[in-house]
Image: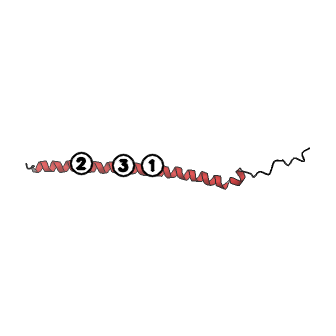
């Protein structure tokens, strides 16, 4: 069975519509994924800042122990 010119044209229009819709959906998906990647990188950068600040403040936040006595005076 042979299709008419109008039938073939209609099939081509439908095919083009499906391709166009797929490209739009793919573009939207790419934008969503890019936004998620940027959010993850931002959170990771914030976490790295906290880790670096913690490492930089280590001696001040964790003073060394000097033994079992205090500098108040001799124990009687």
* SS label for mark 2: helix
- Residue at horizontal 47 percent and vertical 52 percent from the top: 38
Q: Residue 23: which numbered mark, if any?
A: none
Disc 2 residue crowd, few under 14, some 14–19, many 20+, Cα 10 Å: few
* SS label for mark 3: helix
Mark 3 and mark 1: Cα distance apart in space: 13 Å
From the image, tell me which residue sits under label 1.
36
First in sequence, mark 3 or 1: give its number: 3
Disc number lying in front (1 or 2): 1
Closest to the observer: 59 or 34? 59
* SS label for mark 1: helix
Question: Residue 76, how many percent across, how many down?
Answer: 92, 44
Disc 1 residue crowd, few under 14, some 14–19, many 20+, Cα 10 Å: few
Mark 1 and mark 2: Cα distance apart in space: 29 Å
First in sequence, mark 1 or 2: give its number: 2
- Residue at horizontal 68 percent and vertical 53 percent from the top: 58
Colouring scheme, one of rainbow, by chain, secondary structure, one colour: secondary structure
From the image, tell me which residue sits under label 2.
17
Left or right of 39: which side holds 48?
Answer: right
Disc 3 residue crowd, few under 14, some 14–19, many 20+, Cα 10 Å: few
Q: Residue 28: which numbered mark, if any?
A: 3
Q: Residue furthest top?
A: 76
Question: Residue 13, how many percent across, how many down?
Answer: 19, 49
Q: Residue furthest right?
A: 76
Left or right of 68: which side holds 14?
Answer: left
Question: Residue 46, how many percent across, how many down?
Answer: 56, 51
Mark 2 and mark 3: Cα distance apart in space: 17 Å
First in sequence, mark 2 or 3: give its number: 2
Closest to the observer: 70 or 44? 70
Question: Residue 8, how many percent across, how many down?
Answer: 13, 50
Left or right of 14: which side holds 30?
Answer: right
């Amino acid at each position: 069975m042979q299709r008419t010119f109008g039938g073939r044209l209609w099939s081509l229009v439908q095919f083009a519509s499906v391709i166009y819709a797929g490209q739009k959906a793919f573009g939207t998906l790419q934008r969503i994924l890019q936004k998620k990647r940027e959010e993850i990188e931002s959170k990771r950068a914030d976490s790295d800042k906290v880790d670096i600040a913690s490492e930089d403040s280590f001696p001040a936040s964790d003073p060394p122990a000097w033994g079992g006595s205090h500098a108040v005076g001799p124990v009687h």
